[in-house]
Image (cartoon, grey):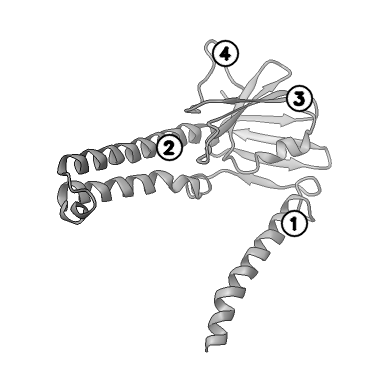
Amino acid sequence: MDTLLTFLIIFIPAGLCFWQLMRFTRDTVGTRSPLKISRVYKTTALSFFFRLDSTIPLYCFFVSGLLFKVCFLKPAPVSVFLENAALKSLTLTVMIALFLLIGILSLAIDLNHWQYAKNVVITTLPEQHTIELKMGDTELILNEGDIQAIHHYHNDAKLRKAYGEYQLTNGDFFFLPDTVEGVWVIKEYFKNIPEDSTVKTLPFIKQHSGTESAGG
């Protein structure tokens, strides 16, 4: 029994990790690479919101609620650690506010980015070496040389929030958050696109004043 438990605990997780690695390699540079076969990547609410980084707001709200309960509803357990009641309340109140702020801002950025990621479909066409990009009612066929530059905006933090502004040679542009499924294939297909990066503490996507994007 002990041997079986050891096998289950050690080798099954290792096997799953190895399988995921093999699958990732197959789907990026292997037999199912978008450069070799036609692949379709669609961003859905499930794929967008049920990611590890998307759980951060829930975690922050949970922690802030727990601290609120400890501070204001059941203060006795923490009195051992903070003898001064005023200091205790101030410390926990600041922590509650901080977690709430992080959660609210993270959720607000996700909701803002979702407007530009919702139902985006990226289809690779390796025989023509083109990419079909659908954004709502807009459909673009991207060929080599169609994208003039990519401007990245990110918060330069471990809890990374980022998006790209794609400038087209015809003067149009469109935005794609980094959380869009398959967005990486654009740079994989067209490797010589000039890129730059700008740090924004709060990387909300905003339309340029007086201009209209290719996505409407």
Determine whether the residue tagged by mark 4 lies in a helix, strand or loop: loop
Looking at marks 2 and 3 on the same chain, the residue that comes earlier in the sequence is marked by: 2
Please indicate whether residue 161 sits to the left or right of residue 138 in the image. left
| Residue 39 percent location from the top left of the image | 71, 47
Location of residue 35 (image quadrant): top right
Q: Amino acid at mark 3?
A: Asp
Question: What residue is rendered at 21% in x and 53% in y?
Answer: 78
Q: Which mark's residue is nearer the viewer, 2 or 3?
A: 2
Q: Which mark's residue is nearer the viewer, 1 or 2?
A: 2
Q: Amino acid at mark 4?
A: Thr
Callout 4: few (<14), some (14-19), or many (20+) C-alpha neighbours within 10 Å?
A: few
Looking at marks 1 and 2 on the same chain, the residue that comes earlier in the sequence is marked by: 1
Looking at marks 1 and 3 on the same chain, the residue that comes earlier in the sequence is marked by: 1
Q: Amino acid at mark 2?
A: Ser
Determine whether the residue tagged by mark 1 lies in a helix, strand or loop: helix
Q: Which residue is mark 1?
A: 26
Separation of disc 1 and disc 2 at Cα? 33 Å
Please indicate whether residue 13 sits to the left or right of residue 126 in the image. left
Q: Which mark is residue 146?
A: 3
Separation of disc 4 and disc 2 at Cα? 27 Å
Q: Which mark is residue 106?
A: 2
Q: Which residue is mark 4?
A: 211
